[in-house]
Image (cartoon, rainbow, N blue to C red):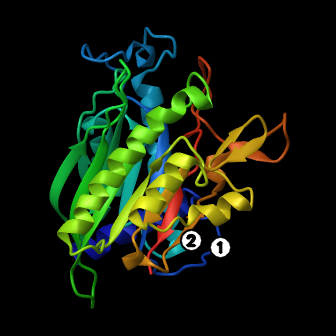
Amino acid sequence: MRRECAVAAVILLCQLCGLWTLEGQERGSRYVVFWNLENYFDPFDDSLTVDEEFTPAGEKHWTWKKFLVKRNLIAKVLLSMYDRYGDWPLAVGFAEVENRMVLRQLTEQTPLAKLGYGVVHRESPDSRGIDVGFIYREEYLTVHDVEALEVLTGRERPTRDILHILAVLHLPDESPESVHFYINHWPSKFGGEEYSRPFRQSAADTLSRVLGALADSAAGELPPVIVTGDFNDTPDSEPVMSVQRRTGLLNPALDLHQRGEGTLKYNGRWELIDLFMMSPALRGARMEIYRHPLLLEEDEKFLGQKPFRTYYGPQWHGGASDHLPIVLLLP
């Protein structure tokens, strides 16, 4: 009874805040989300990383007040998904989070706290302190193992680890099932696409090698696997396609990419670099991009709409992120 009252309170809060403006289409869906949060940093200086830019005295003049605005907007977006899908996400993978604390702020200090999300985070070797993270509904998922997979690119500046989570999914009226999640944030195209491609290929090789070992341990057939993240490359790029060829993963982002849909807008063009891939055990799963008024603003230069981002250069803009979230609807 207490839980039912708590969830009802969250629903009422969302309605009062005017969050649910989309017409519900997928009532009661089970789904997973990924979202690059565009520098979801706390405002405190970490002496072990180069994060001074996101402090009150830094270039971005990042303060606790601005952090709370961003944190609360992220929570509102995740809560708003109920109206479209008939439930809240089973799990959410994130890129560009600074530490465990910012994730706990999200799951414990916003209305998301009523939904019982657990947090998975590991510090990565990224020099700026940018990590990937994962939150999950403890009611439906039990985490059994967590592993940070190092990506060796051969360059002096290290990149983010791939976060592997082994969890058991236990849904009402269904048998428990193990699911492997891999949360990625591959190296960017800094220095140009050709120069940087080998670094993303290193991440692709790491992922392919790990998935190959997983398949070998399961008599040659991959169990339920969900791979997601910001790949800094399109679904038809060589690094991404190499993973598909070597592992047999399905690549549902290809159709969206071919239709010109995207999660990031650059020079007036939408680009799809936030992706899902899954093993054939999850055939029938469907990917879509989550577009909500909270996430978008008018694009006065190139027309149409664009993501409502947090910063333009050093200027605070007040939005949630320069990326749109992606959703994988489970079969």
Indicate the amino acid at tag 2. Arg
Tell me residue 306's x, y (percent).
71, 43
Regarding residue 136, the answer to whether it shows in the image is no
- Spot the residue most to the top: 57
Under circle 1, the secondary element is: loop
- Spot the residue most to the bottom: 173
Regarding residue 316, the answer to whether it shows in the image is yes
Identify the residue position indicated by label 2 in the image: 84
Snapshot quadrant of residue 170: bottom left
- Front residue of 56/90: it is 90
- Front residue of 97/66: it is 97
Residue at figure coordinates x 61%, y 31% from the top left: 193
Tell me residue 165's x, y (percent).
24, 56
Judge whether 11 appears above or below 131 on screen.
below
Residue at figure coordinates x 44%, y 76% from the top left: 330
Within 10 Å of disc 1 (Cα), the crowding (few <14, some 14-19, many 20+) is few
Cβ atoms at labels 1 and 2 below 8 Å apart: yes
Identify the residue position indicated by label 1 in the image: 23
Indicate the amino acid at tag 1. Glu
Among the two numbered marks 1 and 2 on one chain, the one whose residue lies closer to the N terminus? 1
